[in-house]
């Protein structure tokens, strides 16, 4: 688990490191280095502690990745609404080869709906 976390953190730092503050980036890099050293020592408690530290530090990077993904998705949605003027329910995104529909919904109590129709 720790090896996977180190690899993922290093990869994500390369791709999204510019999206986080220098302070957060340094904290993640330090946590990665500390965990690598703990892995060499084979001290289970130290590995677990350093893994938790890296997980916590990586949360900032995860937030930045999420915001970057939202910004890309939001830019695509804005371009679609300018071109076709379609409603939110009609707009789809082709990211990842999937058709995703963004729609608003409202839960309706069927009993309440039946009562409204009876009164009409």
Image (cartoon, rainbow, N blue to C red):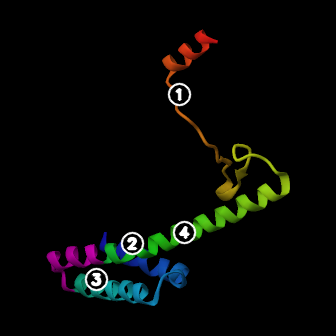
Task: Give the residue number, with chain letter if any, for mark 2.
Answer: 59
**The C terminus lies in which quarter of the figure?**
top right
**The N terminus lies in which quarter of the figure?**
bottom left
Q: Earlier in the sequence, mark 4 or mark 3?
A: 3
As measured in the structure, the alpha-carbon distance from the residue carrying label 2 to the one carrying label 1 is 37 Å
- Tell me if label 3 and label 1 are in contact, CB under 8 Å: no
The quarter of the picture where residue 30 lies is: bottom left
Q: Report the side of 14 relative to 52 (left or right).
A: right
| Mark number, residue 67 | 4
Q: Check disc 2 and report its element: helix, strand or loop.
A: helix
Q: Check disc 3 and report its element: helix, strand or loop.
A: helix
Q: Earlier in the sequence, mark 2 or mark 1?
A: 2
Q: As displayed, is residue 31 above or below residue 95? A: below
Task: Give the residue number, with chain letter if any, for mark 1.
Answer: 108
As measured in the structure, the alpha-carbon distance from the residue carrying label 3 to the one carrying label 1 is 51 Å
Q: Earlier in the sequence, mark 2 or mark 3?
A: 3
Q: Report the side of 21 relative to 98 (left or right).
A: left
Between residues 81 and 4, which one lies in front from this camera angle?
Answer: 81
Q: Residue furthest right?
A: 83
Number of the front mark, 3 or 1: 1
Q: As displayed, is residue 48 above or below residue 95? A: below
The quarter of the picture where residue 97 lies is: bottom right
Q: Report the side of 114 relative to 37 (left or right).
A: right
Number of the front mark, 4 or 3: 4
Residue at image point 52% right, 32% down: 107
**Does residue 46 belong to the magenta stretch?**
yes
| Mark number, residue 35 | 3
Number of the front mark, 2 or 1: 1
Q: Earlier in the sequence, mark 2 or mark 4?
A: 2
As measured in the structure, the alpha-carbon distance from the residue carrying label 1 to the one carrying label 4 is 32 Å
């Amino acid at each position: 688990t720790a090896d996977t976390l180190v690899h993922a953190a290093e990869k994500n730092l390369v791709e999204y490191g510019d999206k986080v503050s220098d302070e957060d980036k340094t904290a993640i890099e330090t946590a990665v280095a500390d965990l690598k050293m703990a892995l060499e020592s084979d001290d289970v408690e130290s590995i677990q502690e350093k893994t938790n530290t890296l997980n916590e530090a990586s949360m900032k990077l995860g937030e930045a990745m999420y915001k970057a993904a939202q910004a890309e998705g939001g830019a695509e949605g804005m371009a679609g609404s300018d071109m076709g003027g379609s409603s939110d329910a009609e707009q789809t995104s082709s990211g990842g080869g999937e058709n995703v529909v963004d729609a608003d919904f409202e839960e309706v109590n069927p009993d309440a709906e039946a009562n409204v129709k009876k009164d009409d």
